[in-house]
Image (tube, rainbow, N blue to C red):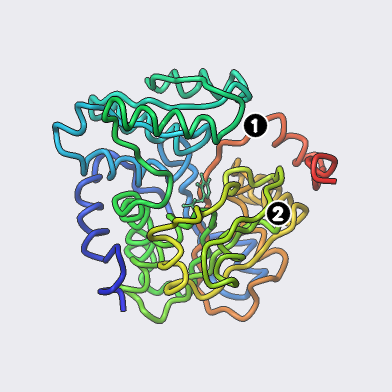
């Protein structure tokens, strides 16, 4: 099956060799409280400890290293205010390349300066993410910069897949893997690695109810648009692209299910991570824990590996959630 997929286990193994030494091998640790709750061993893949605070460094690093020297010299570009922008800025800097990150005037100053601090050339244009993306396309056409997509590119998916290889190496008996899903780059890469090495292992995607583009697309049988709302899991926002090339097909073939979480469930996942595991995790990174706590992935085999995908949450928001707020964005949605 995987031979017909656009990203294979060979690509992921090559990515693993290429990025070795530039990307951290993050710990996989047992969670006593979740193990007790589920009645099977549960381990947490602490990927939020990855350099730049999310797994996106894996894909961005593999993408930059896969470019020819001539391409790298031209520089890389993306429109991202979040984890992909941070990861690409860091990966480019490490390899001596210039990263241009485009964002709109609406992006808060702290996010701008953070990406600037990582060494990127930040361009502020327009009043929306779409206008920032148009600027990316202009610079690609006019200056020959190489666009590195946040999820829908073969070298990005292969890079994210290295996380799956690590899980199998750290827990060869793993029976179920819980993975956050937005554009599907992480889920596609991880599932491709896991299913190649351990075909019987289940890989279950998790996302927020508020704007579940991959779930809606799988149900429709083709990529569709969904309405977007603010969510605690802001890193899971955005669509999968109507002209999706890779991740839709890979998620359709490789994921066993996609489970949706409410804001209150995601908040509970973040609180559990903090109070029981002593981990600061952003909403997107807490959906796996949220699903176990909510009993939404009941009939699954153990041991279970849960990917904590990132930690880049505004600490004021984190504090509000720790103090019991369950849906800070309620009014913006209503
Ligand atoms: C980007 C991101 C995701 C989702 O990854 P996709 O490849 O878009 O599905 C999940 N968690 C965090 C923290 C992210 O930054």
Q: Count of labels shown?
A: 2
Q: Quadrant of residue 100?
A: top left
Check if mark 1's residue and mark 2's residue have beta carbons within 8 Å. Answer: no
How busy is the neighbourhood of tag 2: few (under 14 within 10 Å), some, or many (20 plus)?
many
Is residue 265 toward the left or the right of residue 118 in the image?
right
Residue 286 percent location from the top left of the image: 61, 52
Label 1 vs label 2: CA separation?
Answer: 20 Å
| Along the line of sight, the residue nearer the viewer: 237 or 25 | 237
Q: Residue at x 28, y 43 (%)?
A: 63
Is residue 6 toward the left or the right of residue 243 in the image?
left
Height in image: 34 above or below 229?
Answer: below
In the structure shown, which secondary structural element does the residue marked by tag 2 occupy? loop
Note whether ligand 1 is within 8 Å of mark 2: no
| Along the line of sight, the residue nearer the viewer: 196 or 228 | 228
Residue 297 percent location from the top left of the image: 63, 73
Height in image: 286 above or below 1?
Answer: above
Work out which quarter of the rendered image holds the N terminus and state it.
Answer: bottom left
N-terminal label among 1 and 2: 2
Q: Residue at x 60, y 31 (%)?
A: 128
How busy is the neighbourhood of tag 1: few (under 14 within 10 Å), some, or many (20 plus)?
few
In the structure shown, which secondary structural element does the residue marked by tag 1 occupy? loop
Residue 97 percent location from the top left of the image: 25, 26
Residue 321 percent location from the top left of the image: 76, 41
| Along the line of sight, the residue nearer the viewer: 117 or 100 | 100
Query: What residue occupies the far left of the structure in this picture?
Result: 69
Q: Which residue is mark 2?
A: 210
Q: Which residue is mark 1?
A: 314
Q: Residue at x 46, y 20 (%)?
A: 123
Q: Residue at x 66, y 56 (%)?
A: 208
Height in image: 92 above or below 185?
Answer: above
């Amino acid at each position: 099956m995987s031979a017909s997929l656009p990203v294979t286990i060979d690509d992921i193994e090559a990515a693993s060799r290429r990025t070795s030494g530039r990307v951290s091998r993050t710990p996989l640790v047992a969670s006593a409280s979740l193990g007790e709750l589920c009645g099977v061993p549960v381990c947490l893949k602490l990927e939020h400890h990855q350099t730049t605070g999310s797994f996106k460094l894996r894909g961005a690093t593999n993408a930059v290293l896969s470019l020819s020297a001539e391409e790298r010299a031209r520089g890389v570009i993306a429109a991202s205010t979040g984890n992909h922008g941070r990861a690409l800025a860091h990966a480019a800097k490490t390899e001596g390349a210039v990263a241009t990150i485009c964002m709109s005037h609406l992006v808060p100053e702290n996010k701008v300066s953070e990406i600037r601090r990582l060494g990127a050339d930040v361009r502020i244009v327009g009043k929306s993410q779409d206008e920032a993306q148009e600027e990316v396309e202009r610079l690609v056409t006019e200056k020959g910069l190489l666009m590195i997509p946040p999820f829908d590119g073969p070298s990005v998916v292969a890079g994210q897949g290295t996380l799956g290889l690590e899980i199998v190496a750290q827990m060869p008996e793993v029976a179920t893997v819980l993975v956050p899903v937005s554009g599907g780059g992480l889920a596609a890469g991880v599932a491709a690695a896991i299913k190649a090495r351990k075909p019987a292992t289940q890989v279950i995607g998790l996302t927020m109810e508020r704007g579940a583009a991959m779930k809606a697309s799988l149900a429709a049988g083709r990529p569709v648009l969904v309405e977007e709302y603010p969510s605690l899991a802001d890193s899971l926002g955005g669509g999968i692209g109507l002209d999706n090339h890779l991740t839709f097909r890979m998620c359709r073939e490789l994921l066993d299910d996609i489970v949706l979480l409410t804001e209150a469930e995601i908040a509970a996942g973040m609180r559990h991570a903090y109070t029981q595991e002593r981990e600061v995790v952003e909403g997107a990174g807490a959906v796996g824990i949220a699903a176990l706590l909510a009993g939404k992935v009941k009939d699954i085999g153990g041991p279970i590996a849960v990917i904590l995908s990132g930690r880049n949450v505004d600490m004021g928001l984190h504090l509000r959630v720790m103090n019991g707020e369950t849906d800070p964005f309620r009014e913006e949605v209503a």
